Amino acid sequence: MTSGPDTGDNGEAPKGAAELARAYEALMDFYVGAGVNGMVDEDAVDAFAYVETQARRPAPVRAQETAPMRPAAPARPVQGNAPSAPPKPSAQTGASVNVQPSVQPSVPGDESIVAAREAAASAKTLDELHRILSRFEGCNLKRTAKNLVFADGSPNARVMFVGEAPGREEDVQGLPFVGRSGQLLDRILAAIGLERQVVYIANVVPWRPPGNRTPSPQETEICKPFIKRQIELVDPDVLVFLGGASAKALLGVTDGILRLRGHWMTYDTGKRQIRAIATLHPAYLLRNPAQKRLAWRDFLAIKAALEEGVAS
């Protein structure tokens, strides 16, 4: 059993203020990454009952109200119909409570998808698309992610790899596939004579979902125009989907990855047809090492297609 965020490598509590501060920082980072956005008590609190209770509480007694009483001044005759002064709130009536509604992130709708399509279509270069995406506020995943994970590799690459979404290491570094699955991908690429610097790697969703959860269908739809425009601007000869999620999002297929992988398909950019293939995600291979033989077949097919000078 691994030690928690508040313990050292040997399972003992950290010593010293600096170690304790780092432990708390790691714990808070874990909570934020898991999607925690507020702290609660062990017992549930009825917020509506709490507000009503606060409203019924008597107002605090002011100092002048507790001072010794002085003899009342003689009453003056009232001239005409002078308006009476509004009554002051008393301790018996209670003070009014002004409850401010908490500000919650808005739930993006169809207008966010339309805005994403318009923004992505306006980009003429990858650098411009990067700037547009960094300013885009239509996806709530941006609120919880540390960094935008746009892409890595060569914009002139002949082969482009597309995954589903960044993980924790990718979120920290702002680059796709840099964790354990990315290291495995680098080794597979090297085995067929390719390096990360000569391929292009991106994700359908460029922000890490909290706790590495699966992106929702709406989040995927909002982000999809940007990856589609990315593919158009890179214009590779071969498009590789890393895992079934990216293939389903961009090709509209419904088969599982084990049935989908290894078969050549066509991706239509609207200007040309690109040969596409799906393969097993490196993270899946880390969990199922026996399936690496299937991925190796896929990468050999990718190598052969590149050697043939695939073009449309």
Image (spheres, helix red, strand yellow):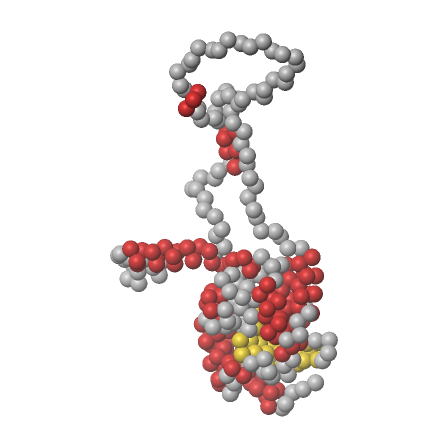
Of residue 288 and residue 169, the one placed in the foreground of this image is 169
Residue 86, quarter of the rendered image: top right
Of residue 250 and residue 205, the one placed in the foreground of this image is 205
Residue at 47% across, 81% down: 187
Does residue 259 appear in this view?
no
Of residue 47 and residue 3, the one placed in the foreground of this image is 47
The image position of residue 164, as x and y in percent, is: 57, 68
The image position of residue 212, as x and y in percent, is: 50, 61
Residue at 64% across, 83% down: 237
Residue 19, quarter of the rendered image: bottom left
Check the picture and name the quadrant holding the C terminus: bottom right
The image position of residue 188, as x and y in percent, is: 49, 81
The image position of residue 169, as x and y in percent, is: 46, 67
Residue at 42% across, 14% down: 69
Q: Considering only vertical position in the picture, is 45 above or below 307?
A: above
Residue at 55% across, 60% down: 142
